[in-house]
Amino acid sequence: IITISTDITTVGADIIRPKGVPKSPIIYPVPKFSKKLLQERDELLHKMKSFDKSHTVLNIGMSAIAPNLYFIPKIEKTHNIKIISTIEKEELLIKKLKEGIYDLIFITNKININKCISKKIFYEQLYFFVSKTHPLAKKETLTFKEMDGESFLMNREVGFWDVLVRENMPNSHFILQDNLDNLRILIDNSTISSFASNLTLNERIVPNRISIPINNKNAIVDFYLTYKKSIDKKIVKLFFNIQ
């Protein structure tokens, strides 16, 4: 129940009145709680402005999930930077970089665009991540053909890797997970094969699994950080300084 205060504030207003009747202010009751809401709004706006001054917000596009797992958490943890990331096809990433929607993009080809810089920043190699009891676990490398027909646990948002594994293993079944933590739980507690990357192998050890390189030229990809020349160079260095 809201109790309206009887405190009043005078508010001037023009109304239609008979001739000869002088203008006079209209008295409206203004509840105290509205003043409190206005004060809270002003405080919130002040906090938002303070956040903008002390934090940098970056919009980053990428064609695969690797930057999301490897670069972004480390930068956000050690700097006052908020990163908004999106996985899209490379032609869209380039288009949106030109339009100013993205500040930086991670793509697999070095491109030559006016007022932009494109530099190689890392490479990613895809591995099969199989149980130590898997029949092929002792092999030094594996081909897509050897693994075609098996079931795989996989993150739903992996970018172009999704297309690569489906095209090369058309008889396989892919069990997709939207939540990365849930995916890790399934990997830890099952023998269903999965995938790993050279970027994440040292980040997380799973005792009952072994990583085996995929013997395919398309399973190794170079990534290029592409950005406009006008961006703060200190921001760019943060990405290149991560080892």
Image (cartoon, grey):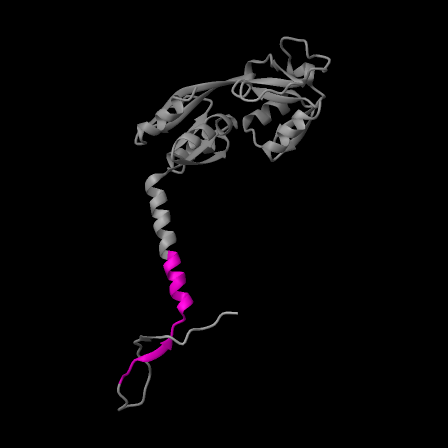
> Which quarter of the picture shows residue 109?
top left
Query: Residue 48, image x and y in percent?
Result: 37, 48
Query: Residue 179, image x and y in percent?
Result: 60, 35
Asked if residue 66 lies left or right of residue 143, the reply is: left
Q: Residue at x 26, y 87 (%)?
A: 22
- Magenta run includes residue 38: yes
Q: Residue at x 72, y 15 (%)?
A: 133
**In this orientation, does residue 60 appear?**
yes
Q: How many marks?
A: 0
- Magenta run includes residue 111: no
First to last magenta residue range? 23-41
**91 vs 154, nearest the viewer:** 154
Query: Residue 185, image x and y in percent?
Result: 65, 29
Q: Is residue 133 above or below residue 78?
A: above
**128 vs 188, nearest the viewer:** 188
**242 vs 97, nearest the viewer:** 242
Q: Is residue 175 above or below residue 41?
A: above
> Which quarter of the picture shows residue 78?
top left
> Which quarter of the picture shows residue 151?
top right
Query: Residue 150, image x and y in percent?
Result: 71, 21
**In this orientation, does residue 115 appear?**
no
Q: Residue at x 36, y 38 (%)?
A: 55
Name the image quarter holding the C terminus.
Answer: top left
**242 vs 117, nearest the viewer:** 242
